[in-house]
Amino acid sequence: MAEQDQDQEQPIIVKKIEGGHGHHGGAWKVAYADFVTAMMALFIVLWVLGQSEEVKEAVSGYFKDPIGFGNQQSRNLIPGPQEGFIDPSMINPQMINEAQAEREALEKMGEEIVAELADKEEFEDLVDQIQVEVTNDGLRIEMIESADDIFFEVGSSSLNNSATTILSKIGTRISDMNNRIVIEGHTDARPFNSRGDLYTNFELSSDRANAARRALLRGGLKDEQIYEIRGLADRMLKDPEDPYSVVNRRISIIVKFQKQK
């Protein structure tokens, strides 16, 4: 009886086995990456097998000698013109030299225009408001208003005498060129509403550009030289940080490069 009681009193130990999925680590990512790499290699092999003998030879030559293939042969694996690549044989040194010569000629002409205006006593206070620079479009000549000197009355497209004379002289200077001429009118961001909702800064800037066109023609610019008149309102501010700044009110004359359409 004592032994039976002792057996019955022995504790029963139950071991629990944890279920669930637990943490697998990153091994599956490595396996998946290997699988994707293998599939990519398979697709490349299948693509090469379907190409011409020329492409196969090019691929073979690249893997045999990658450095020599790039330095000596300098050709694409896929025959024909490739987007984003420039064929050196298509580069015309003469065209490059001509473009550079025209750029330098326009830059020189812009400097001469400013120098000629600076020599006139009547323009000595205005010459700082004439800016010239060569851009990707061509020679840009800008007449920029200041707080002390304006070319148009506020809200008007009528040029004052000084501005008319300056534009006439510029017209004379560029009248013997074959380049196309673009004239732009720019305003600040102040809304223009004195004539109603239908007349805005777009109309005002267009009218000012046309006033500049007439002054250029008066100086000798030929009508057929004029390619475009643009009224840009406040869409190309010279001082974006201050949309109301007076420097945003200006006339731009662009002498386009001859090769540009």
Image: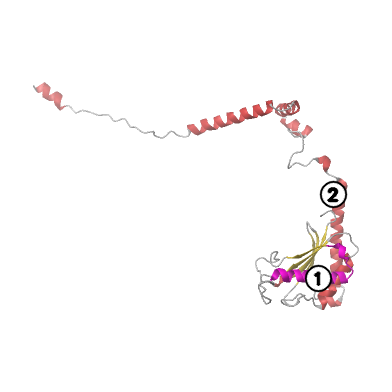
The image shows a total of numbered marks equal to 2
Query: Looking at the image, is mark 2 or mark 1 nearer the viewer?
Result: 1
Name the residue that disc number 1 marks.
Answer: 212
Percent position of residue 212, x then y? 81, 70
Mark 1, other Cα within 10 Å: few <14 / some 14–19 / many ≥20: many
Of residues 2 and 146, which is closer to you in this image? Answer: 146
Q: Main secondary structure of the magenta part?
A: helix
- Quarter of image, res 198: bottom right
Q: Amino acid at mark 2?
A: Ile
Name the secondary structure under disc 1: helix
Q: Is residue 22 left or right of residue 5?
A: right
Give the farthest residue toward the left: 1
> What range of the chain is rendered magenta?
200-226
Percent position of residue 94, x then y? 88, 47
- Quarter of image, res 230: bottom right
Marks 2 and 1 in Cβ contact (< 8 Å)? no
Of residues 123 and 214, which is closer to you in this image? Answer: 214
- What residue appears at the point 83 percent right and 42 percent down from the top-left corner? 90
Q: Is residue 33 left or right of residue 165?
A: left
- What residue appears at the point 13 percent right and 24 percent down from the top-left corner? 6
- Magenta stretch encompasses residue 221: yes
Q: Amino acid at mark 1?
A: Ala
- What residue appears at the point 75 percent right and 25 percent down from the top-left corner? 53
- Magenta stretch encompasses residue 223: yes
Name the residue that disc number 2 marks.
Answer: 96
